[in-house]
Amino acid sequence: MKRNKKIIGISCFVLLLLVGIIYGYMHSINIYRLEVTQIEGSGYGYKIYERERLIIVQPFIPVVSGKRPFQSVQDAQCIGNLVLERIKAGNEFAISKADLDNLGVVY
């Protein structure tokens, strides 16, 4: 009888621990969001939010000289998503010209 109670107690603890880990993982995934914005004049940029706090404003194509906005929503979305992936992975999120070329971004 004592053994059964011990097994049930340990099982409940493990189950609660797993639920907590899964909840924490799912919650951490959804704290960031990307918003593509239209730049005054012509072109697009993006903003990245951590929950409701604005953490990145990128009105121009990174790593390209001059202040040139993205030519399409898709280009801004692709680079913004790449930055988001890198932030979530805990990696350096700077963009290189190779990144722009690999994603087919026109600059």
Image (tube, rainbow, N blue to C red):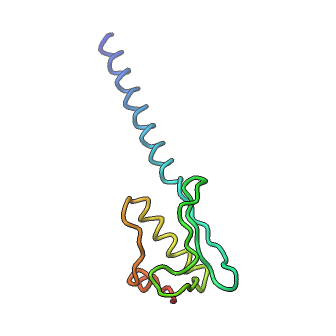
Q: Residue at x 41, y 80 (%)?
A: 99
Q: How many marks?
A: 0
Which residue is situated farthest in the left direction here? 3
Quadrant in the picture for the N terminus: top left
Residue 98 point in image, percent of width and height: 38, 83
Q: Residue at x 48, y 65 (%)?
A: 84
Above or below, comparing residue 80 to residue 5 in the picture: below
- Front-lying residue, 94 or 22: 94
Residue 44 point in image, percent of width and height: 62, 79
Above or below, comparing residue 31 to residue 37 in the picture: above
Residue 54 point in image, percent of width and height: 58, 59
Q: Residue at x 53, y 53 (%)?
A: 31
- Front-lying residue, 78 or 64: 64
Which residue is situated farthest in the top direction here? 1
- Front-lying residue, 82 or 49: 49
Residue 15 picture quarter:
top left
Q: Is residue 71 left or right of residue 22?
A: right
Q: Is residue 4 left or right of residue 32?
A: left
Which residue is situated farthest in the front direction here? 66
Q: Is residue 70 left or right of residue 24?
A: right
Which residue is situated farthest in the right direction here? 41
Residue 79 point in image, percent of width and height: 50, 75
Q: Residue at x 55, y 79 (%)?
A: 60
Above or below, comparing residue 92 to residue 13 in the picture: below
Residue 11 picture quarter:
top left
Above or below, comparing residue 69 to residue 29 in the picture: below
